[in-house]
Image (cartoon, rainbow, N blue to C red):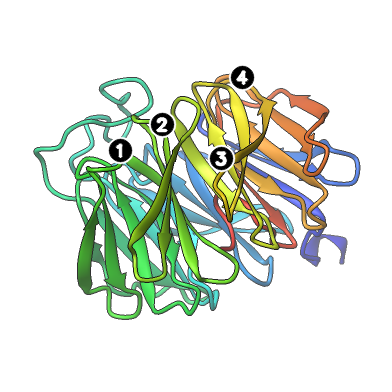
Amino acid sequence: MYRSRVPSNVAYVSEEDGAISVLDLKTLSVVRRVQPQEVAPRGLAVTADGKYLITSNKNTKDAAVFSTPELRLVKRLGLGSSPEFLKLNPSGDRIFATFEPSSAGGPGKPPSSGDTDNDTNGPPAQIASFHIGDWRQGPTSTAGQETESIEFSRDGALMLVANEAQNSIGIFNAVSGAHVRDIGLTAYGIRPRGVKTSPTGSRYAITMESSGTLLEMDQDFKVVKAVPTGARPYGLAFDRDGKRIFVAAAAARKLQVFSTDSMQLMAEIPIGQRCWHFTFTPDDSQILLACGRSNNVIVVDANSYRPVRTIEGFGLPWGIVTYPKSYGSLDLP
């Protein structure tokens, strides 16, 4: 009976070395780690009911669906070369996954430069979609080269994707997958990486990795403000009230906190190496960061910004999400 229960008050961590770890959020300790065959997970998402954990796997051109009570593999979803980012739509009935046919890394090969893939001359990236539960494939959208983060408008009607190589945000019809328009961002920075919708749906935040820029767009996709960040910003998230924007500046080894209204820098928190993604705990009291090159998860207080704990022993942690679901760079708007 215990094994059939959906785990609660937990965080899931994807590790590029091939493992998935489960953290007990009460004790802040690892309570389970599995290492399935032929799974090298990057992106991950947990379904709205907590029954399934989905990972995108860089070496096998697919996504994997796990039953959370036992972390048992139940389904593989075919994608293409270098799958990376996963995102549930707001209604929670479909999962979207980016993959990059032009990636110089490709399955089983290292990227051509650092942690990013830089082949801009090959075929464009794709965003595949699948229905939760029966895992039927839905529409696939064609984006730009090196498409990274996925986000949705608050009403779920539009899908936004970050086209790194084109310095643009692609806008798609979330139901049909049809391309609507592109928003050029070259005037503001280089390589958009993270995209987030505010809890109110009135604005969007975007990180631009190579220029160290945080942008704010209104609901009509007009840039209203651009401010500098620490080096190599990627993951970002609004807090639940929408009053603060948290940015993981990976190369600067800082988690930065900005006021949503003024876009002024409020605080900086020292973190580890290559901390790309992070999540609030379900009660919003703490933030957990997956730090890939430090091989650890760093926990900080979400209000005092003080360190709480460092959890060691991971192998290239990439992403982190919680159940119950909470705000973070990978989950919820």
Q: Are marks 1 and 2 in contact (CB under 8 Å)?
A: yes
N-term-proximal mark, 1 vs 2: 1
Could you say which disc has been placed on residue 247 in the image?
3
Q: Quadrant of residue 186?
A: top left
Residue at 26% x, 60% y is 170
Name the residue beneath numbered marker 4: 294
The kind of residue tagged 2 is Gly
Name the residue beneath numbered marker 1: 189
Residue lying furthest front: 262
State the separation of the CA atoms marked 1 and 4: 28 Å
- Which of label 4 and label 3 is nearer to you? 3
Q: Nearer the viewer, residue 80 or 287?
A: 287
Circle 4 Cα neighbour tier, 10 Å, few/some/many (<14 / 14–19 / ≥20): some
- Which of label 1 and label 3 is nearer to you? 1
Q: Quadrant of the N terminus?
A: bottom right
Q: Are marks 4 and 2 in contact (CB under 8 Å)?
A: no
State the separation of the CA atoms marked 4 and 3: 18 Å
The kind of residue tagged 4 is Ser
Circle 1 Cα neighbour tier, 10 Å, few/some/many (<14 / 14–19 / ≥20): many
Q: Is residue 32 left or right of residue 61?
A: right
Q: Nearer the viewer, residue 105 or 125?
A: 125
- What is the x, y in percent for residue 153? 44, 71
- What is the x, y in percent for residue 175? 34, 80
